[in-house]
Image (spheres, helix red, strand yellow):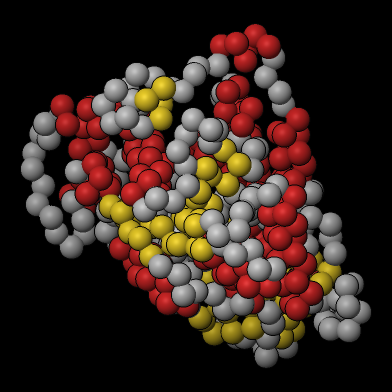
Amino acid sequence: MKIEFGGGLEQLFDNKQTLELHFDEPEVTIQTVIEKLAQICNELRSNVCLFLQDGLVRPGILVLINDADWELLDKEDTVVEDKDTILFNSTLHGG
Amino acid sequence: MKPVCENCFKNDAALKRPRNGMKVCKECFFMLFETEIHQTIVDNQLFARNETVAIGASGGKDSTVLASVLKTLNARYDYGVNFVLLSIDEGIKGYRDDSLETVKRNQVQYDMPLEILSYDKLYGWTMDKIVAQIGKKNNCTYCGVFRRQALDRGCVQNSIGHVVTGHNADDVAETVLMNLMRGDIQRLDRCCDIVTGDSSSRVKRSKPLMYCYEKEIVLYAHYKNLDYFSTECTYSPEAFRGTARALIKNLEAVRPSAILDVIHSGKQFQLSKKSKARQVRAVQCSQCSYISSNTVCKACVLLNGLNASEPKLRLTEDEGGAALPVRVLEKLQF
């Protein structure tokens, strides 16, 4: 599964624009992906608070699944699989 | 399964619009987004034919989208406006120098002339030097006051009477809440005006994107593959503004229309006769002759303070900017 970061979020992930993730299950909810990313964030000693708030993606971070707004789908409960691309794009930076 | 676009009923929808929950495809989104900005421009008669207008360009998402959309609309609706990119170099190593590179590429991409003015040239101080002297507290105040005047000066120097900025709906709603929460009635009265600067000020300012959601600005830039810079300023933002921003974002998550609703409410505030009578008249600053509400303008007051207090130790310029030793020291405290 391909994870992309934009809007400064890459700074939380060792300045990597993209990341490959694999799960044992063929299908997972995006919340599982988010929790995995939070774990990576913690391992890198990045400030996970800039990514998560109360266990959910921080308001102001846009999530695009295969380039489509996750608000069109089921947000956290959207089921994703290995061939999907997920972009986390923060709007929380200066203009 | 992606839902179908609720505008053309042909393509897959790409996003849900926060203003009304409408699901639209990329093409319809571009058209709706651009047309709404055009409508704002027409309704408020923002531009005049043959006018030269400066676009306050930081290289960030808002001003990049502003420049791109204005170029598109100027061609599509024949406004007959000459646009110029105006950038301010605050002198922040690792932040502004990188974003200015973006603006230089925008100059080519949008085929607009570019003017860059630096704090160093205008005031004799870069933000790195200011932070080295005063620390990280309150430095946003200096930057904000200086930038506002710098944009004015840039316009005056180039005989331009109008500057547009990329302030979006989220920014304006945030400002309404901030003014409300600190009881700044005079600012509350005018923060929702799309055009500011009266007949006495030399430069008119306007915000063509003030009804555009930040979400849509970022998605417009993303889907159009616009070249913009998205790193947070190395000096942490004002705590109060940050809190107001988080509040707005949390409200948006629960009720997306809240952002436009706050602006709508903000527009209805009117000063009482008593407060209006207390309103200070604009005068010219006795030091720099810029428009001011006091005999000496805020920028000059701040500058006088900076120039008066001799730096306790001289810092040498290095790769991390003059503020690096301060940052290193602050890290040591942990």
User: In the drawing, does residue A87 fall left or right of residue B130?
Assistant: right
In the picture, residue B299 is in which quadrant?
top left
Q: Which residue occupies the foreground of this view, B245 or B129?
A: B129
Give the farthest residue toward the front: B50
Q: Residue at x 84, y 83 (%)?
A: B11
Q: Which residue is drawn at 39% across and 37% down?
A: B145
In the picture, residue B116 is in which quadrant?
bottom left
Q: Which residue occupies the foreground of this view, B219 or B193?
A: B193
Q: Where is residue B141 in the image (x, y as percent from the top left)?
A: 39, 36
Q: Position of residue B252 (x, y in %)?
A: 72, 49
User: In the drawing, does residue B111 fall left or right of residue B118?
Assistant: right
Q: Residue at x 57, y 78 (%)?
A: B225
Residue B54 in view of the camera = yes
Question: Does A54 appear above or below B177?
Answer: below
User: In the drawing, does residue B170 fall left or right of residue B310?
Assistant: right
Residue B154 in view of the camera = no
Q: How many marks?
A: 0
Q: Where is residue B231 in the image (x, y as percent from the top left)?
A: 43, 62
User: In the drawing, does residue B216 fall left or right of residue B98?
Assistant: right
Question: Does B197 appear above or below B206?
Answer: above
Question: Does B155 appear above or below B226?
Answer: above
Q: Position of residue A56 (x, y in %)?
A: 66, 58
Give the farthest residue toward the bottom: A83
Question: Does A92 appear above or below B107?
Answer: above
Image quadrant holding the N terminus of chain B, namely bottom right
In the picture, residue B24 is in which quadrant?
bottom right
Image quadrant holding the C terminus of chain B, namely top left
